[in-house]
Each structure stands twice: as C-alpha cells, then as structure tokens.
Amino acid sequence: MKKMKSKILFLSTLLVGCSTQTFEKKIETSDVDLLKEESLMRYNTNRLETMDGQEKDFISKALLACHQKKFTKGMGLLEQEMHKNKTNAFYWNALGTCYSLNKNFQKAMFYYDLGVEALPMTKAETKAIAEATLSNNIGLIHLNFRRYNEAYDAFNKARAMVPGFFTPEFNIAQLYIEFNENDKALGILKKLETKNPDDIDLLYSLSLVYYRKNEMDNSYKAINRIKKDYLNRPDIVGLYAYNLMKKNRLIEAKEIIGKRLYANEYDKRNKILLEEIDQKLKEQSKAEKK
C-alpha cells in the first residue's frame, strides 16, 4: 500500500468508527459477532456472564474484570503475578489490554512492547498467535494517536502471520474507508462476509462503503440485514435513516432518528439529517396541496 497522506481526508457527515469504539448497545449473541474471539473490545454482556461462572486462569480472570471496567481488580490480578511472567508474551498483552480498555494508551503501548520483547521466549506452537495479537493491538494504539501508516503496517503484519485472524483484516478495511479507498475496503468486507454474513459492524461497514460509492440500493440492502434491535445504535441509526430518506420513506426516517438518544460524536450529524428530513416532508406536503 502506498504511503497514506499525512492529512486525513474529511469524511462525509456519515462517520465511520474503527473497532476500538464501544457503544451503549452491546452485541448480545455470538451469531452476529464475527470478531467475538479476537477483538479486545467485542466482549458482550452474555459472554461476560458466561465467563464469570467458569474456572479460568488468572489472565482470563483479569481480562474479564477489565472488560467489566473493574480495572483495579483486573490490573491487581496481573501485577501480583508479574514476577513469574516476565517472559510470557500473553501476560504482557493482557496487561496492555487492560490499560487500553482504561484508555491509558501510552501505558498500554509500553506493555505491548514488553510482550514483543518476550516473543523469543514463547513456545513455537503459540508464538505466531501471540505476535499477531500483539501486532493487532499495537495497531489499535496507533489508531488512537492517528498514526495511520503505523496502524496499517501493524494490522497487515498481524493478518500475514495468522491468515485466519479476521480482526486485523476488518481494521484494515476501516482504514481504507477512512481514506476513501472504498473498492479496497469492499474487497476485504465481502471476503469477511462469507465468514459471518450477519455481523453487525461488518454490515454497517458494507452499507457505508456502498453509500460512498453512490450505490444506494446495495447500501440499503446491507443495513436492512442488521437485526432490528441494533438499528438504533448511535453509529448505525444515521445511516439507516439516510437510506430510508433516499427511498422517500420520510416518516419512518424521521421517527427512527427523532426519538433516539445519541453518543456525543453523532449528535451534530444526526441533527443535520433530521433537519433535511423535515425539509423534505415540508416540500412533500406543499406539493400534495397543489
């Protein structure tokens, strides 16, 4: 991939988030979660409750606590085992992940780097997955600091090491979307679609790419496949309402976007869209009266 521009292209009002983002609406069932075993942010409520009742090693217990936002507990479990695990790459990855979940990205990177240093001491049968996991998570840290070239290199390294590792491929697709390279993003997303055609973030990303390509029928088909319970998620609802508006289903579009509470980063976008829908409704009403 040629070197990305240092200055990010401005997106349309329809924003896209990488898999580092979290939303109030959790993914509750594994059948709509392609990345469930890989992404450090895709632990859902049901899975956490299931894990809570299982016997597990201290790393799993610590990660469970950190995903539940019990950071003092999770980091405490890890730190008390530090002396025994100085050469354990998975240990340092877990500690980095806890700090990443707590949004302390500089410390997260420090511990991920210690994980990389421990790789030569990792057993051969688990070394590739350890290195790929660390590389993917390091890529996510680069994204938080908007170091896009470094993020791309880290994701690309992770997917090359473990070809069945879907998360870095998905993250690369998000980078392509960010830089308006929609055909490249579409190629990756269509491949991932064969693995799980019902994944929520995958379908949203497909819909967004088709929107960017002005293929509104395909955009609607993709977003309309998202299970109804997730259509009011802050990032999804704006694109869904836009698709409804383009199909002249103005009342439905107004209802779905007008009654939702949004995350702050989506407020402005959705208010602009609501104003556009209202204007179209007024124009439609005037035309009917003539």
Image (cartoon, rainbow, N blue to C red):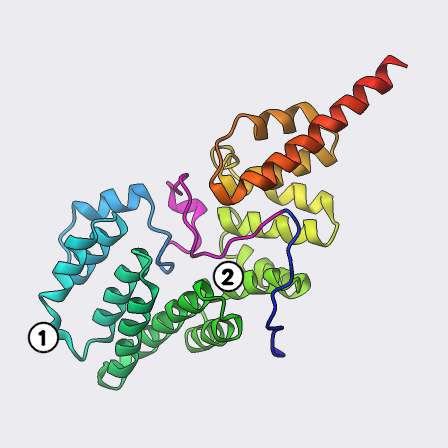
Q: Is residue 264 above or below residue 1?
A: above
x and y, in percent, of residue 281 in the image: 74, 23
Of the two numbered discs 1 and 2 in the rendering, the one whose residue sits closer to the viewer: 1
In the image, taking residue 105 as reference, residue 277 lies left or right, namely right
- Asked if the stretch drawn in magenta spans residue 17, the answer is yes
In the image, taking residue 46 as reference, residue 210 lies left or right, namely right
Residue drawn at point x = 30 percent, y = 67 percent: 108
- Asked if the stretch drawn in magenta spans residue 261, the answer is no
Residue, disc 2: 170
Q: Earlier in the sequence, mark 1 or mark 2?
A: 1
Quadrant location, the C terminus = top right
Judging depth in this view, the residue of 289 and 32 nearest the camera is 289
Whether residue 57 is visible, yes or no, is no
Q: CA distance from mark 1 to mark 2?
A: 35 Å
The quarter of the picture where residue 62 lies is bottom left
Residue, disc 1: 83
Question: Magenta part of the protein: which range?
Answer: 14-36
* Callout 1 amino acid: His
**Is the residue marked by circle 1 packed among few (<14), some (14-19), or many (20+) residues within 10 Å?**
few
Residue drawn at point x = 9 percent, y = 65 percent: 80
Disc 1 on helix, strand or loop?
Answer: helix
Q: Is residue 25 above or below residue 123?
A: above
Residue drawn at point x = 65 percent, y = 36 percent: 273
Q: Are marks 1 and 2 in contact (CB under 8 Å)?
A: no
